[in-house]
Image (cartoon, rainbow, N blue to C red):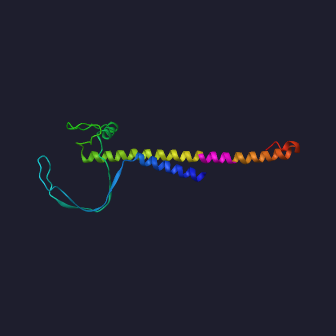
Amino acid sequence: MYRLFATSTIALLAASLSASMPEHVLVNGGNFLMGTTWREEGVDYEPVRRIHLNYDFYIGKFEVTFEEYEAFCDETGRILPDDSGWGKGARPVMNVSWTVKQLMINWRGNKLQKKLLSEIADVIILVLKFIALFIRRTVLTNWLDSFQHLLVVALPKELAMFSK
């Protein structure tokens, strides 16, 4: 029973963690071509060139939306950027500098870390409560068995058959 409880607790913690973390994709290091091969009005033309990444890294699978960025702005006192007439809500945030994006990444990471630590603490408390309950039940059962044995020994034989 203890193994079943421990396994289900670990599964619950893993599911909770994966639900609270934004989805990421691994980008493998190596070479790739970057740039554009056509010219279009309003699009920045960048000649094609070879880029080399020395390391692997993770990147968010989805863009940061105005809704997500608004939570960051509310908590840190920043001004929400202009949407250039495109609309806000679930649309990707725009008009944000690289430096501010890095601040938001760190802010989100700290929030997730706090949430993770809180969830781990909750699981540890749950496990400790289960262990305490198991110990109490075991001690109480052993004590009752001993007490019942004393009653059976002390009772007359005619009444002993009713003690079990």
Q: Position of residue 72 (x, y in %)?
A: 33, 40
> Residue 35 is drawn in which quadrant?
bottom left
Residue 64 to residue 45: above or below: above
Taking depth in this image into account, of 135 and 111 the one nearest to the observer is: 135
On screen, residue 144 versus residue 128, left or right, reads: right
Q: How many marks?
A: 0
Residue at left offset 42%, top offset 49% = 18
Q: Position of residue 132 (x, y in %)?
A: 62, 46
On screen, residue 6 versus residue 95, left or right, reads: right
Residue 156 visible in this rendered orientation of the protein: no
Residue 4 visible in this rendered orientation of the protein: yes
Residue 47 to residue 88: above or below: below
The quadrant of the image that shows the C terminus is top right
Query: Which region is colored magenta?
Result: 130-138
On screen, residue 78 versus residue 160, left or right, reads: left
Q: Position of residue 101 (x, y in %)?
A: 28, 46
